[in-house]
Image (tube, rainbow, N blue to C red):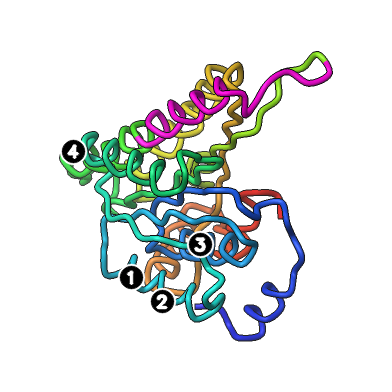
């Protein structure tokens, strides 16, 4: 949880870029997702918070209500990204709840998987990581992008000065693990590399529909048990691991 000083400083930032915009944030019960909900709620956005952990999701709503007060327009949507029917139903509910308008998606849900050396890694867990982090991310992206594309067809986008405008934005959470490799986390690193490839491909596919697709690759958050263990593993391989502040990552998503 952020300090009161950080909350006060952030709350006083004047930024109207997102006022009245609707954003879906998956993985909203985790560190990055929760900070994203706070960031956008403070700036007047309509926030649809998605997570399969209802308890963590409710904690996010309570923290946003405490920080932003009655001005916050945030709603919780429990959803399992590995279930296409659940995703489609949830996205449609969000679409209707917020006036048939979705402007942004932070595609942030994920599962880190086991921490085991490659020679000992369980193939079933590898498959689970890929199902959540890659297939689940694609299913959410596709469902949201279809609605964004229909909105542009309804004249919310268009051509300006001879160029196609891109009023909608999707940001996928990848990881520095995809770029540098992470000891004992082969499934996680592989899934995040797949997300980077997905991002480039979908960015080209969706650009004609007025949709920008980008990715960000944060590092591990410290301190903590996982942080300590990863530092030990990286030290043994001669590769340092760098810290990442969850609030800063939330800001980096949208260039704030």
Q: Where 210 falls versus 237 (above or below)?
A: above
- Which part of the image, by quadrant, shows the C terminus? bottom right
Q: Residue at x 50, y 46 (%)?
A: 106
Q: Residue at x 57, y 57 (%)?
A: 240
Disc 4 crowd rating (10 Å Cα; few below 14, some 14-19, many 20+) is few
The residue tagged with tag 4: helix, strand or loop? helix
Residue 186 in the figure: left or right of residue 35: left
Q: Earlier in the sequence, mark 3 or mark 1?
A: 3
The image quarter in which residue 131 lies: top left
Q: CA distance from mark 3 to mark 1?
A: 12 Å
Q: CA distance from mark 4 to mark 3?
A: 34 Å
The residue tagged with tag 1: helix, strand or loop? helix
Residue 123: which disc?
4
The magenta segment is: 140-161
Q: CA distance from mark 2 to mark 4?
A: 38 Å
Q: Where 133 falls versus 35 (above or below)?
A: above
- Percent position of residue 126, x then y: 24, 40
User: Overall secondary structure of the magenta stretch?
Assistant: helix
Tell me whether circle 3 and circle 1 mark residues in contact (CB < 8 Å).
no
Q: Residue at x 70, y 49 (%)?
A: 255
Q: Earlier in the sequence, mark 2 or mark 4?
A: 2
| Residue highlighted by disc 2 | 62
Residue 9 in the figure: left or right of residue 170: right
Q: Nearer the viewer, residue 6 or 159?
A: 159
Tell me whether circle 2 and circle 3 mark residues in contact (CB < 8 Å).
no
Tell me whether circle 4 and circle 3 mark residues in contact (CB < 8 Å).
no
Tell me whether circle 1 and circle 2 mark residues in contact (CB < 8 Å).
yes
Q: CA distance from mark 2 to mark 3?
A: 11 Å
Q: Which residue occupies the extreme bottom position in the image?
A: 4
| Residue highlighted by disc 1 | 58
């Amino acid at each position: 949880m952020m300090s009161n000083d950080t909350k006060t400083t952030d709350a006083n930032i004047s930024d109207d870029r997102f006022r009245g915009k609707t954003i879906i944030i998956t993985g909203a019960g985790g560190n990055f997702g929760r900070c994203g909900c706070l960031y956008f709620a403070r700036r007047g956005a309509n926030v649809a918070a998605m997570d399969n952990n209802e308890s963590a999701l409710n904690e996010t709503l309570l923290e946003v209500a405490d920080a932003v007060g009655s001005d916050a327009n945030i709603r919780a949507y429990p959803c399992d990204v590995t279930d296409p029917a659940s995703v489609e139903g949830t996205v449609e509910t969000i679409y209707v709840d917020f006036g048939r308008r979705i402007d942004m998606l932070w595609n942030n849900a994920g599962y880190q998987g086991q921490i085991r050396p490659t020679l000992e890694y369980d193939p079933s867990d590898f498959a689970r990581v890929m199902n959540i982090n890659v297939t689940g991310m694609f299913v959410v992206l596709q469902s949201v992008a279809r609605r964004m594309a229909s909105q542009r067809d309804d004249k919310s986008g268009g051509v300006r000065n001879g160029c196609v405008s891109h009023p909608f934005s999707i940001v996928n959470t990848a990881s520095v693990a995809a770029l540098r490799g992470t000891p004992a986390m082969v499934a996680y690193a592989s899934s995040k590399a797949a997300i980077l490839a997905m991002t480039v491909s979908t960015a080209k596919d969706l650009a004609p529909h007025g949709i920008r697709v980008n990715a960000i690759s944060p590092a591990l958050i410290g301190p903590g048990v996982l942080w300590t263990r990863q530092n030990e593993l990286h030290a043994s391989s001669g590769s340092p691991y760098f810290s990442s502040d969850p609030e800063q990552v939330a800001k980096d998503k949208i260039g704030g």
